[in-house]
Amino acid sequence: MKSGRQRRQEILLRRRARSSQPHRHVLPPWEVDRIPRGAVAADLDKLWHDNTYGSRPLYYLNTSFTCIDCGKSEVWTAVQQKWWYEEAKGKIDSRANRCRDCRRMRRLRRSQDRRVHVEGMMAKYGLEQTASRLSMPIDVLVRLREQWEKS
Ligand SMILES: [Zn+2]
């Protein structure tokens, strides 16, 4: 017959063993029921790079946001979010703030080599042809050119 003290000790040990196990990827059933349709489940094991406690998402949902550069509304898809947080190791509290075109434009603007290349194309083919060759909206190319001229 075990004493109360022994029993308490066993419970404590079991509890400790459980909490030292790697946490589960699979959500408990009561959480699964709460996942909205279209959500993409998070892989919590891939989110440990960020030590912000208590804010790890259980799933991702398509969310729309307004681009801080051009004001366009764009959707940050659940799949993109999953990639951003889990593969690119983006910070948990980081959010999309620029649309696809503006992100691309920033990248191009920062690269001197690309500038020489794109300016060469514009000189050779003109604005419209260059935009179509780069499969970029013409107004984005125009803005890019303006920013290059200013710098
Ligand atoms: Zn934008």
Image (tube, rainbow, N blue to C red):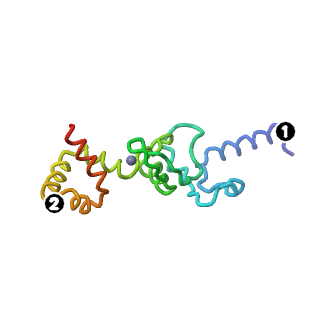
In the image, residue 62 sits, relative to residue 68, either above or below, namely below
Question: In front here: 146 or 35?
Answer: 146
Q: Quadrant of the C terminus?
A: top left
Q: Which mark is residue 125?
A: 2
Q: Look at label 1 and name its amino acid.
A: Gly
Residue, disc 1: 4
Q: Earlier in the sequence, mark 1 or mark 2?
A: 1
Q: Which mark is residue 55?
A: none
Looking at the image, the residue that sits furthest to the right is: 1
Question: In front here: 113 or 52?
Answer: 113
Please tell me how crowded label 2 is: few (under 14), some (14-19), or many (20+) other residues with Cα within 10 Å: few
Q: Calculate the distance from the C-alpha at mark 1 to the C-alpha at mark 2.
A: 86 Å
Residue found at x 75% / y 39%: 9
Position of 65 compared to 34: left or right? left
Residue found at x 51% / y 50%: 64
SS type, badge 2:
helix
Please tell me how crowded label 1 is: few (under 14), some (14-19), or many (20+) other residues with Cα within 10 Å: few
Position of 35 compared to 56: left or right? right
User: Whole-percent x and y of residue 101?
Assistant: 35, 52
Q: Look at label 2 and name its amino acid.
A: Tyr
User: Whole-percent x and y of residue 58?
Assistant: 59, 50
User: Whole-percent x and y of residue 94?
Assistant: 47, 41
User: Which of the 4 quarters of the picture holds residue 19?
Assistant: top right
